[in-house]
Image (cartoon, helix red, strand yellow):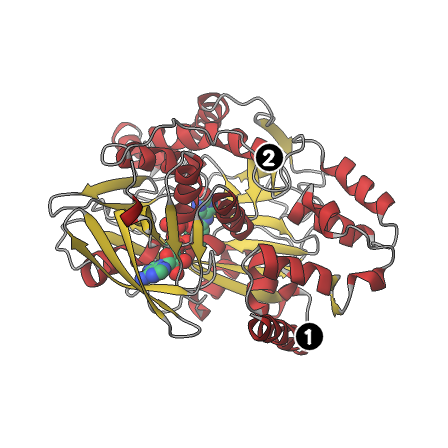
Amino acid sequence: MRDSHDIDVVDLFVIGGGINGCGISRDAAGRGLSVRLAEMGDLASATSSASTKLFHGGLRYLEYFEFRLVREALIEREVLLRGMPHISWPMRFVLPYHKDMRFESDTPTSKLLTKVMPWMKGRRPAWLIRLGLFMYDHLGGRKILPGTSTVSLKGTPEGAPLVDRLETAYEYSDCWIEDSRLVMLNARDAEARGAEILTRTKVLSATREGNLWRIDTQDTETGEMRTHRARMLVNAGGPWVGDIIRSKVRLNTREGIRLVRGSHIVTRRLYDHDKCYFFQGTDGRIIFSIPYETDYTLIGTTDAAHEDPSQRPVCTPEERAYLLEFANRYFKRSIDEDDIVWSYSGVRPLYDDGASSATAATRDYTLKVEAEGGAPLLNVFGGKITTYRRLAESALEKIGEHLTVAEGPWTAGVPLPGGDFPVDGVDRLVSDLASAHPYLSPFHARRLVRAYGTEAAEMLKGAKTLADLGEDFGATLTATEVTWLMNKEYARTAEDVVWRRNKLGLRLSEDEVARLDRWMDAQRRAVAAAE
Ligand SMILES: Cc1cc2nc3c(=O)[nH]c(=O)nc-3n(C[C@H](O)[C@H](O)[C@H](O)COP(=O)(O)OP(=O)(O)OC[C@H]3O[C@@H](n4cnc5c(N)ncnc54)[C@H](O)[C@@H]3O)c2cc1C
């Protein structure tokens, strides 16, 4: 029972508006806890907008014997897909095979094989890939996603863009996810269930005062300071998790975090079909090549040690060269620097399990509660976008050891905003939207459904012509959409809009983005003046 005098004390204060902070907030708010989340930048402004954007089991983790993680992630793909069929969809992955593909030398599988089959000299045999794919097909209780098949690369669309020496490939399923929209929709749903979401709010310090936490924050736009009180603190700071423990909460800990940078490059569309490639290297690593935003191809990723979370990650010239060279071992038409239209980079906050290389460090998550000095603190280490919902459930189990959590797990299959339609219902929604709004181009209608799902109709309600959608910022972005993003989706700047609420930054010129920024700034001032 809550007393009237502690009305402003929340049950949970969550630091970090990435996927883990927003996922935990949504789950907790839905179970009746009072929740406040502080994010120092925009939602998903760090790692959670810089991923490869896959709901995947992680085929390569099987070589590290990470069976728990792979199984959980495989099962999770379809659970997630059902709850967000607008921002997530199945993809087929084509994995060409040739005999020079090698293991990273310190995977448990590689070590085992070197012992029993020394003549393989670190090569990854075809039977092993088939075994991995068999496990991938059967570990995860697939119902929607098709299983593995073999594809010829001779005279087929899948083989057309690839070098001639490749003859056969395996094909398997995983899912695409719009990572930054996923984060924002979790935040919105958390708010709809009573949570308070504070963006541009930095946590400066968190101190135990008996059974409560006192948390001091600063609004990064106005400089305004605020003090909050909470029964439990959740540190979902991603790459900053260690920094928060040491310099905001000021605790000594033995838990370590390993920061591993991963970069991607984006080129104009490199091939005509809608499948992805899974390319294996001779260094034991793999990269993906993925059809991206209709007209582009996404290639990544790298694994490089990253020392300091406050150092903004960028795709270095070495990483660009590495990705180009890797892809060029597979593509018939060689690609170079001039083909790159954009690149991005993110830092994986991996739990430090003492692995020798960045590639080998575990991708599983670890939750640790610190309750010795009074009010409890939950630290979140590692994790993947794919396992965020399960991570949130595990977090709620831990939270339940310290706070009264009356309700059990509830998020499986519960739609996120706009996701309340069948998994195969996107085409239907697009044609309904296009008939109700015949002035939309096919690209525009599909883009809106893929971003907003069933809410696209609500956004366009009452509009009879394109002019009714207000100012046109280019690339189908209109004032109606930007107003929606500012009012409902926490967007503050043009960068939030064109890189995290959508990817129209790929299509808009610098001048167009600057004009959008000025327009948004004027809107914000008008709102502030009216308050
Ligand atoms: C290159 C790359 C590719 C990946 N690909 C995939 C993939 O395909 N599939 C998959 O499942 N996973 C993938 N991942 C993993 C996944 O992206 C991450 O595990 C996940 O995004 C981490 O989320 P998070 O919430 O823990 O961290 P973040 O998203 O980094 O969120 C932490 C937030 O805390 C905020 N914060 C920090 N300190 C403070 C403070 N003092 N006050 C207020 N806020 C603060 C930060 O601003 C940040 O927004 C990939 C990761 C990388 C880097």
Q: Nearer the viewer, residue 191 or 266?
A: 191
Q: Quadrant of residue 482?
A: bottom right
Residue 331 on image: x %, y %: 61, 52
Residue type highlighted by circle 2 = Thr
**Is 508 positioned to the left or the right of 147 in the image?**
right
Q: Which mark is residue 392?
A: none
Q: Residue at x 48, y 21 (%)?
A: 138
Q: Quadrant of the N terminus?
A: top left
Q: Residue at x 72, y 47 (%)?
A: 458
Q: Give the Cα separation between the discs numbered 2 and 1.
A: 45 Å
Q: Which mark is residue 168?
A: 2
Which residue carries the number 1 mark?
Answer: 512
Q: Residue at x 66, y 54 (%)?
A: 293
Q: Nearer the viewer, residue 58 or 497?
A: 497
Residue 233 on image: x %, y %: 27, 49
Q: Secondary structure at mark 1?
A: helix
Q: Nearer the viewer, residue 197 or 165?
A: 197
Label 2: few (<14), some or many (≥20) within 10 Å? some
